[in-house]
Amino acid sequence: MLSLSVRYSTRNLRSVPFVIKSQSRSYAASCLLDDLTQRGFVHHVTRPEVLSAALESKRQVAYVGIDPTAGSLHIGHLIPLMCLLHFQLRGHGAIPLLGGATGRVGDPSGRLTERQLADIEQVSDNVDSLTKGIQAFFRRAAAYAQARGLNVDESITEPVVTSNLQWHENINLLDFLRTVGVHARVNTMLNRESVKARLTSQRGLSFTEFTYQLLQAYDFYFLHKNHECTIQIGGSDQWGNILAGIELIGRLDNPASEDIEGKAFGLTTPLLTTASGEKFGKSAGNAVWLDANLTSVFDFYQYFVKVDDADVGKYLKLFTLLAHDEIASIIKAHTAQPEKRIAQKRLAAEVTHLVHADTGVSRAVTLTKLLFESDYNGLTTQQITSALEGDPRLVMVDENELLDSPIMKLAAKYHLVASTSASRNLVQARGLYINNQTIPESQFKVTRSELIDGRVAILRAGKDKLLIIVSKGNV
């Protein structure tokens, strides 16, 4: 979890306040831990009764660690980030911690083979990019919460993204051994699931990976000591590393006490798989990124539109801030008419709003309507051009050209079809359409009244090849 391009001092973790003022729906009425459990965020948790009481009695601080293995967040990160968001919206402190130091080593948890040591410069670049991505996520999440009418705690503070390189780069080996190593029991370390799995593998486990749990344990201790952090959130494969941190805090805070858990807690989220058994977050084997430059807003939206019926209820609980009764109503309506994919469309709209704001939803829904639906009623020129901004299928022409040229020739000129003869053949086969109406003959010209919003012609060849021609004007 690594240092930022403008290096934060540790005092920057004192978060900057911002307020969500909506008074429409009470968010803090239910117990946070109960709500997280109902939503499916809780796989394992230490001392649940004690943690629940602590959360209800005073402000706690929770952190989530993120490995800088790539320069962008993907939708697999939504699970821990949404969990952290629930803490933040209830008025608790939230620390997203990037592994600027530990990312140089590599976490063995959940892996059968050793990671290649990362390039230090690449790790640093990834941290810089991830910092911006996480900041954007929480800013948009605040707006999303407000749009959903949540009456959240007015004392909530904006998380400040930091990196564990800030403290690890200045500690030498001898100091680390005296502070951390002296409290680590090798037999306990060997019994961690992540370690046992690798010890039985053909290639075994390197000493570097073996000590990873101590580095992560020290992160928890450092944040606990310096920033009153009491809760670590991680994936289910992080359970052993989290316990190591809790034990270190207990031993260093109260060396004479037999209660090594002290005031620290751990919560792990489940490994999420789809109904087909695939790891959540992949589309045709590729990651679905939160960065629109890596995964378009449209493709992001479509990933959630296409989720299985068996998964959609679970995802609505995990990836939206909708109330439980509203989710139940959505699932009930979906069950009555599953062919309409009511739940999937609502899920896609909610998650796209969360990640890409309401403008992202508008663009994705508009493009979906253009590509997959036959009813273009209600679409405006602004919506269409915004949804297709930067898309080569969008062509701007003079109005005279659009109204005076046969549609067959425009289709060929702007590469919807390969040639004028191919376009003519398509017309004869009744396979060329304008605004979902079959073009009747090869010399057909469109009138202004037949255009969408008086300016837009959507040409389609066959089932899915589109060309959108818009007459120039103020858009």
Image (cartoon, rainbow, N blue to C red):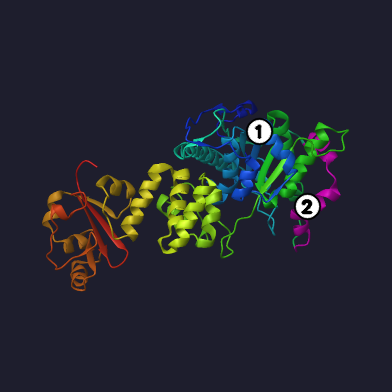
Number of the front mark, 2 or 1: 2
Judged left or right of residue 20, residue 120 is right
**Which mark sits nearer the N-terminus, 2 or 1?**
1
Q: Are marks 2 and 1 in contact (CB under 8 Å)?
A: no
Q: Residue at x 50, y 39 (%)?
A: 141
Q: Magenta residues?
A: 173-202
Q: Residue at x 34, y 53 (%)?
A: 367
- Between 292 and 250, the one lying in front of the other is 250
Q: How far across and down, in percent of the image, does residue 453 sit?
A: 21, 49
| Residue 78 higher or lower than 149, as above or below | below
Q: How far across and down, in percent of the image, does residue 364 sit?
A: 38, 51
Task: Give the CA separation, mark 2 to mark 1.
Answer: 27 Å
Please, what is the dominant secondary structure of the magenta stretch? helix
What amino acid is at disc 1? Gln
Where is residue 467, by image quadrant?
bottom left
> Within 10 Å of the Cα at label 1, are there few (<14), some (14-19), or many (20+) other Cα atoms?
some
Q: How far across and down, in percent of the image, does residue 48 sit?
A: 72, 43
> Within 10 Å of the Cα at label 2, are there few (<14), some (14-19), or many (20+) other Cα atoms?
some
**Viewport quadrant of the C terminus:** top left
Q: Secondary structure at mark 1?
A: helix
Q: How far across and down, in percent of the image, does residue 360 sit?
A: 40, 45
What's the mark number on residue 7?
A: none
What's the mark number on residue 192?
A: 2
Judged left or right of residue 201, residue 322 is left
Q: Secondary structure at mark 2?
A: loop
Return the residue at label 1. Answer: 166
| Residue 199 higher or lower than 265, as above or below | below
Q: Residue at x 84, y 38 (%)?
A: 259
